[in-house]
Every structure is written in structure tokens, then in C-alpha cells.
Image: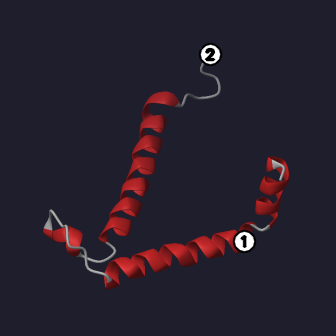
Amino acid sequence: MDLGRLLQAMVERGVLLRRIMYVVLAGLVIADIVVPSKYDRFPWESIGGFGAFYGFISCVLIIVVSKALGYLLLYRSEDYYDE
């Protein structure tokens, strides 16, 4: 199968694929809550769904910090070179 056709088919079925991925992710979090982990190094690792919550908060924090650094250090006004 041609890669272009495969990607086009995935784009056309984007809503369906997104819903399937949400169901899979929710199933993984539920499995993490139901099946206890036996190899926890820290007490908070034994909380069900902690890894998913920690990963989500970490990604949001990375985005917020990078946007703040971009506004503070990188972005310039439109007439930056006219001065």
C-alpha cells in the first residue's frame, strides 16, 4: 500500500482514530488502577493512574515554560529591525 494513500485514509478517519485512542488510553489507566504494581520504588508510584497524571502535568508544564521563555527571550516586535 502506498504511504500517501494510507496517510490520507488516516486523515479522513481522524475523528474515529482519535476516539479509538481515547478509549485505549482510558483502558490503560483503568488497567493501571485495577492491576497493582509490584515494583514500586516510591510510595506515590503505587497510586493507580499516577504515571498518566504525572506525564500529562509534565507535558503541560514543558509547554507553558517553553512558551514563557519564547515570549521573554525570543519573540520580537514587528519593527525590531527598523529601529
Q: Which residue is more in the foreground, 39 or 60?
A: 39
1 or 2: tag closer to the N-terminus: 1
Residue most extreme to the bottom: 34
Residue located 54% across and 75% down the image = 24
Q: Can you say whether 32 is above or below 45 in the image?
A: below
Q: Could you say which disc has been placed on residue 81 in the image? A: 2
Instruction: Please state the horizontal and vertical placement of residue 80, each as a whole percent of the image.
Output: 59, 21
Location of residue 38 by image quarter: bottom left
Instruction: Please state the horizontal and vertical placement of residue 9, each as a whole percent of the image.
Output: 82, 61
Residue located 33% across and 66% down the image = 51
Asked whether the beta carbons under mark 1 and mark 2 sit within 8 Å of each other, the answer is: no
Q: Residues within 10 Å of mark 1 (few under 14, many from 20)?
A: few
Q: Which residue is more in the foreground, 23 or 60?
A: 23
Q: Could you say which disc has been placed on residue 15 in the image? A: 1
Horizontal side of residue 77 vs 54, given as left or right: right
Tell me the kind of residue under disc 2: Tyr
Q: CA distance from mark 1 to mark 2?
A: 44 Å
Residue located 76% across and 61% down the image = 10
